[in-house]
Image (spheres, rainbow, N blue to C red):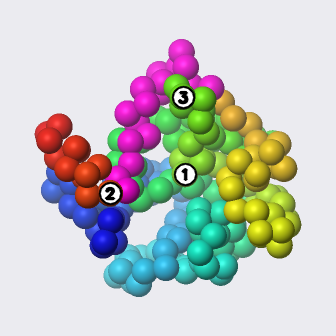
Amino acid sequence: MGTNKALIVYRGKELYRYSLEKLEKLCDEIIISSNNPDYTHLPYSCYPDDIKDIGPLGGIFTCLTRISNPYALVLSCDMPFIPYEYLEFLQRNAHDAAVVCGVNQHGMPEPLAGVYSKNVVPAINALILKGEYRMSALFKQAGARLIPLQGSPFQDIGIFKNINTPEDLSDLLECI
């Protein structure tokens, strides 16, 4: 993207605020995973990845090792269309699960809108030691609960639309 995409303004609001507004209603503890110091003005703890350059697994690992709750609701900063109700749905389905996330219409899990148990920290650590950083490897090792969303109120693939490139942002702005 060439810039911190979380700070990009979409419909009058920085992208990260869409996620925070939902999480503030659902969580009693919020931790921000970022290697960028742009969040020091927020009233939340912000941690850089303990293990750099391993993708989302590194941020999830870092947060899970710092939270006081047994579960973490993980939500990426670049997915402004995730409905609040979807996050509630994930929380309701998290009981006794190591990982819970939805599976989109293309059959792909959406790991950056999911619930993760602190109990997966050893599994993540083992994967990191092996040099295996794919979320799918964690899902397999942890026995993730992957919920197909087809036929649910959340089946619309558009809820997972994220912004990774200037073209993605341009496409969104054209839809306004």
Above or below for 20 versus 145: below
Question: Alpha carbon of mark 2 to alpha carbon of mark 1: how far?
Answer: 17 Å
The part of the chain drawn in magenta is: 148-164
Q: Is residue 52 magenta?
A: no
N-terminal of the two: label 3 or label 1?
3
N-terminal of the two: label 2 or label 1?
1
Front residue (pair 28, 52): 52
Which secondary structure class fits the magenta region best?
loop
Going by the numbered disc 2, the residue's amino acid type is Thr
Task: Report the residue marked by disc 1.
Answer: 112
Of badges 3 and 1, the one in the foreground is 3
Q: Tell me the tag on residue 165.
A: 2
Going by the numbered disc 1, the residue's amino acid type is Leu
Above or below for 97 versus 118: above
The quarter in which the C terminus is drawn is top left
Q: Is residue 158 magenta?
A: yes
Count residues near mark 3 (Cα–Cα under 10 Å), then give few for <14, some for 14-19, many for 20+.
few
Going by the numbered disc 3, the residue's amino acid type is His
Task: Report the residue marked by disc 3.
Answer: 106
Where does the image place residue 145, in percent across and percent down from the top left? 74, 37
